[in-house]
Structure formats: structure tokens, C-alpha cells
Image (cartoon, grey):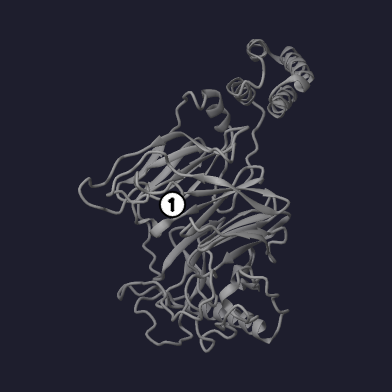
Amino acid sequence: MLVNAYTCPASQNDVSVFKNLLFMSSEATNSRQDCNFGGVPEPVSENRVRGIRIFDISDIAHPKLVTSVQTCRGSHTHTVVTQPGDANNVYIYVSGTSGVRPGDELKGCKDGGLDDPYSARFRLEVIKVPLAKPGTAAIVSSPRIFNSLPVPPRNEERAAIDAAARAAAAAARGEAQGAPDAAGGRGGRGNAPAGPPTGPNQCHDITVYPEIGLAGGACAGLGLLLDIHDAAHPFRIDMVGDANMSFWHSATFNNDGTKVLFSDEWGGGSQPRCRATDKPEWGADALFTIENKNLVFHGYYKIPAAQTNQENCVAHNGSLIPIPGRDVMVQAFYQGGVTVFDWTDVSHPKEIAFFDRGPVDANRPVMGGSWSAYWYNGVIVSSEIARGLDIYELLPSGLITQNELDAAKTVHFDSYNTQDQRKFVWPPSFALAKAYLDQLERSNGLAAARIQAARARLAAAERANGQQRRTALSQLATQLNSDVPGTADQAKLKLLSAALSDLAKAH
């Protein structure tokens, strides 16, 4: 049931939610401080908002605009960042994709080339949001992440930007009391004049993984690896380029943070790049390991089934699936459908499941397909542009077992934002132990007779109760741990032994 239609024109209105706060990106030049329609016709105006709007949605039926934080290039997308150990604040990473707005409109905004230390073209804006007083949110740092030119210390220009942000916040708080105007025009993308040719200088999406202190920046022409141990002051530790990548769109880490993949949204997702005549590198994922803080390239992943000329098809949004002991991901490929692939062997990723509806129209190109596909508490949720919301459940096959799926379903989140990646932790369960046994069998990591015997003893322990169960699990864990030196997959056997020990303690 629709409870409220809250109007607040902007583009592209990318939205994130953290507890009672909603953050909205604004990049277009028509966005107003008061959220009214009508736009801002003047080329320079204090009424314009380009940056992050912050709403209080404690009463979801009556959202309240708390403040707006102005940035020099607006915000096409943003990432909400949590700092481990800090429950009082969240941070927002903003990298606009438009031209730099005039300094007459927002003090401290300046265009310039690579040799200009004050240029706004190469920075990431970091906004600190005190959760108890979100109206005081403001820019706290502007790290220069796109080249190695040192960022100057806090100075008059940087102070002017911070002061302007605070003034804009105060103005927004004063104007937010009125109701939005129901009449008026239509939003659009910001179109400020392009500055000097400078190479890559914008991020489309930044995925953060606070528990390991890293972020992956999919930055149009580059892939960046950032250190975010201090969330307020991220810095670049490596970057990669690839002639086969057209538009670095998003990033995903594996669960232990030793790998990262970047997706390529060739043509903005509107092009048919999965045809038999297209290179497998086009519109695909580029896969890297992270070694000594460096990105090391290993290969690409792309759906293996060729699509037609009428189907827009490139890699897009996805997330990890919590199958223990493996790196498995679900990903949207527009009209290429939904793919589930294993990239545990980062040099040889392979598809293990898929769903493909076919073209929206077999006779002409029509925009459609899965825009995003995310795993959430046991199901896959896919946003299908032309045909609505799809909910999938994975089924067992020769490449994935029921035990692995059952173990994956033991991981639960109250909420999940894929850009704020969280570590999967599997609670002790018989499904977890059985999943590791299935994987040892699949990889021939343990002799068949030993696997059969372990399964029998595990089944007997599951039928037992109390001390008998604990003793059976502990004895099996001890025996398997003693077998580790002579097995082909020592790492997986150690995981199995640990899972059995944890299960014994839990009972």
C-alpha cells in the first residue's frame, strides 16, 4: 500500500538506508534545496543541491529532510561506510561523475588538470554523519585517489568547502519545513561543461568491506584498491587498468578478502555484448587476487551462453552467496539473465547455475533484463527491468549439493547492503560439516572410504543426544584432524574438523 508519494526531484536519486536515515544522491543541476519542482534556471544559485540529501525515516509515512551536504561534482552514486568500533557515526563516500560546479556557487570548487593540487576532479568526498545529530553531517576529508599528486593539507580552500557544506545544511534545515510543490518540471542529469582532459577521474561505485579495511573502487576507466581502516581518511594502495574494460561499474570481494572482481557495464547496459561474435572479455568481470596490497589479474568471467542481437547483455549488479568453503556469486546480466558462478579457482571461474527468460522482444531491441541479483537469507532477489521482481531458489545439481545450500541458508542478516560488504560467518550446524564432506568428495580431497566412514559417523552423531552426541563429534573431529597431513585437500579437511569441534561445543 502506498502511504506517501514524497517528491524531491534530482538525478539519479541513488538511495541507501542506514537504520532511521535515508541518503539520496543528487547530481542534476535542477535539484532544489526545498525539494520543490521547477528546477533552478540560474547558472549559479545557492538554491541548487548537488551532493547528498539526508532524510529521517523514523516515521516511514512522513520522511523528513534533515539536511543536504553539498559537493563539487554532485553525487551519481554513494556508499555508506561503517567504522568497526564506532557505533556513533557512519560515513558516506561520494564521487561525482559530472563536471565541477562553479566556485561562485560552492566555494572551494575548482576545475583543473593533473598538476593542480586543488582540482576537484580527482578526489573522493568523505561525509561524516553523526547518528545522534545527522543535521550536522559535513565533509571531513577529500582524499585524492586518482593520481599520486599529494593532497595539500587543510587550507583556506578546503575550509571554504566545509563551511559551504555547513551553510547549505543550515539552509536545508530551514527550508525543509514546507511541503513539496506538487507541480512542475522533470529531472535530468547534470551537464556542466567538461573541464580539461585529465583521464579517469570518477567512480561509478565503491564497495567497502570494513571488516578487512579495504574498498574496491569501480571508477569508470580504472579499478582502485583503497585502504579504509580509518573510514574518514581512505587512501589508494593500488590501481589497475584494462583495455578490454569499457566502464568499470562495480566491485565485489570474496569472503576472506583475498580476491576482488570488477564488472564492466559496457555501453551503460544497453548494448548486446553477449553474442557469439563478441569477445568473452567484453562486458565481463575482471578477476584479481590481492597480494601484498597489490591487484594481480587472473582472468575474466562472462556468461557462457550466447545471446541474440535483441538482448542487452553485460555484467551488472550481484553479490556473494554464503556457500562455505567456496567463492560463489550470483550476478545479473540484463537480458542474459541471472548467473551463479564459482570463482574459487580465480583463473578458471565457471557457471554452476542460471536462469534466462529470453528476449523481451525477439524481433527488436527492447531495454530489459535483470538489473540486479542479490542473495538474501536463502533466496535470490532479481530486479527485472521490464518484467518485475523475480525471486529464485537454488536447486541442487552435480555442481552444488543440498548440504551446501542448507549451510548457506544458516547465514542470516537483518538487513544487507551489498556495497557495505559483510563477512559471512556460519553458525555450527550438521549442514556445514556435511557441506565440507561433499566438497572433499567433489575434489577427491579425501579417500572415498574415509568420506563414507565419516558420513556414517556424522549421521550417527546427529541421531544421538547430549553427551553421546558431543563425544561422537569430538572424536570424529580429532580423527579427521590427524588425517590432515596425508590428504590431498588439507585446508578443506581442517575446515571440516573445526566445524565438527564447534558443533560439539554447541551441543
Asked whether, in this view, residue 4 is left or right of residue 258, the answer is left
Residue at far left of view: 363
State which quadrant residue 494 falls in.
top right
Asked whether, in this view, residue 316 is left or right of residue 438, the answer is left
Query: For numbered disc 1, what is the local secondary structure?
Result: loop
Q: Nearer the viewer, residue 173 or 83?
A: 83
At 50% across and 58% down in the image, what residue appears? 243
At 76% across and 22% down in the image, what residue appears? 484
* Residue 118, percent from left and from top: 63, 82
Q: Nearer the viewer, residue 354 or 383?
A: 354
Asked whether, in this view, residue 93 is left or right of residue 3, the answer is right
Q: Amino acid at mark 1?
A: Trp
Above or below, 107 relative to 456 = below
The residue wearing badge 1 is 282
At 69% across and 23% down in the image, what residue appears? 488
State which quadrant residue 188 falls in.
bottom left
Above or below, 225 relative to 351 = below
* Residue 149, percent from left and from top: 68, 75
